[in-house]
Image (cartoon, coloured by chain):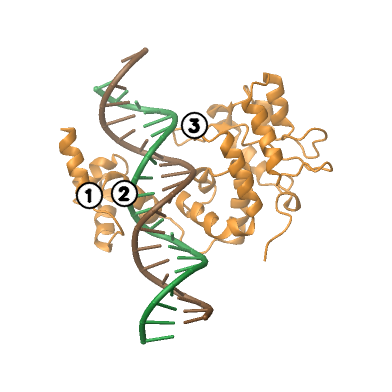
Chain colours: A orange, B green, C brown
DNA sequence: AAGCGACACAACCGCTGCTTT
DNA sequence: GAAAGCAGCGGTTGTGTCGCT
């Protein structure tokens, strides 16, 4: 049985999708709806794996998708969100109507990464200390957010800028190490910076019931409030995280 | 005009976590 | 509670296109 299926998988077609395949998939989903991708791949007549079907639909065929150049607003939001969430592309894409996680990821990797190389370092160093993919809610509701990744970056007069990979490591190290609960919370609420926090703490800190995550329920409840806060210029002063735009 | 390298984007792969049995 | 199956995510790779020599 398993052997049979694995043999069948070998027959799955790979590579670029042809217009007629797109049409088949679109018609099938319009009739039967999304989901059960394994079934889609079998019943639609496509010789494609379920994963491939899903990806094609989500990234290309789905209605209301935007293609083409990112607007300045979208780009700005990506930068802000990336600073906050790191490489959580699906979350970032969720705030960009019509854009997919793959598109955001590609855009970041091809366009923005050149302009903000200091940010790569920061994310990599932060991910190296918490490399495991963070839990994301299965429901369509907002996900669980890892508090370490949401830590606000303080303004500073003590070299504690948000672009500092060292400082980011300090935060995550502190959180991941065997520090006490209160020390961990301190590390988060200070954004890893000892001393003054020049910018107002984020509203979600008040809702933290543990150092590691914010509950789905509380995020759902307060989500829009937090997002609008996130999007405010106060939170990510451009001159701190991105002091220069490289030529 | 041909060859080559860089770039952009689509698609694949491996892994994780949730749901179902 | 354990195992299996499935969906989704992020990293990586493959391929087509464009510009330069």
User: In the image, which disc is placed on residue A12?
Assistant: 1
Q: Are marks 3 and 1 in contact (CB under 8 Å)?
A: no
Q: Please give the name of the residue rendered at 25% of the width and 58% of the height, measured from the top-left corner.
A: A21
Q: State left or right for residue A110 relative to residue A185.
A: left
Q: Position of residue B4 (x, y in %)?
A: 43, 72
Q: Which chain carries label 2?
A: A
Q: Which chain carries label 3?
A: A
Query: Mark 3 or mark 1: which comes first in sequence?
Result: 1
Q: Where is residue A79 in the image (x, y as percent from the top left)?
A: 62, 51
- Asked if one can make out residue A33 in the rendered structure from this viewpoint, the answer is no
Q: Please give the name of the residue rendered at 71% of the width and 29% of the height, measured from the top-left corner.
A: A187
Q: Distance between the residues labelled 2 and 1?
A: 9 Å
Q: Which residue is label 2 attached to?
A: A52
Query: Mark 2 or mark 1: which comes first in sequence?
Result: 1
Q: How far apart are marks 2 and 3 (CA)?
A: 23 Å
Q: Where is residue A196 in the image (x, y as percent from the top left)?
A: 82, 35
Q: Please give the name of the residue rendered at 67% of the width and 19% of the height, measured from the top-left corner.
A: A181
Front: mark 3 or 1: 1
Q: Are marks 2 and 3 in contact (CB under 8 Å)?
A: no
């Amino acid at each position: 049985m398993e052997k049979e299926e694995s043999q069948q998988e070998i027959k799955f077609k790979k590579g670029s999708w042809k217009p007629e395949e797109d049409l088949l998939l679109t018609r099938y989903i319009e009739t039967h709806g999304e989901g059960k991708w394994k079934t889609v791949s079998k019943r639609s007549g496509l010789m494609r794996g379920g994963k491939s079907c899903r990806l094609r639909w989500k990234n290309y065929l789905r209605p209301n998708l935007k293609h083409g150049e990112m607007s300045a607003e979208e780009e700005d939001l990506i930068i802000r969100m990336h600073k906050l969430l790191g490489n959580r592309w699906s979350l970032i894409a969720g705030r960009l109507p019509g854009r997919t996680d793959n598109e955001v990821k590609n855009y970041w990797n091809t366009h923005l990464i050149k302009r903000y190389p200091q940010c790569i370092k920061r994310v990599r160093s932060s991910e190296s200390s918490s490399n495991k993919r963070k839990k994301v809610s299965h429901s369509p509701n907002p996900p669980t957010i890892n508090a370490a990744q949401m830590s606000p970056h303080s303004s500073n007069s003590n070299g504690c800028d948000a672009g500092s990979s060292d400082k980011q490591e300090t935060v995550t190290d502190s959180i991941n190490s065997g520090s006490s609960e209160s020390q961990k919370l301190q590390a988060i609420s200070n954004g890893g910076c000892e001393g003054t926090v020049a910018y107002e703490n984020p509203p979600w800190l008040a809702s933290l019931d543990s150092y590691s995550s914010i509950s789905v329920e509380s995020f759902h409840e307060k989500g829009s409030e937090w997002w609008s806060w996130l999007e405010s210029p106060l939170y990510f002063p451009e001159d701190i995280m991105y002091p220069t735009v490289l030529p």
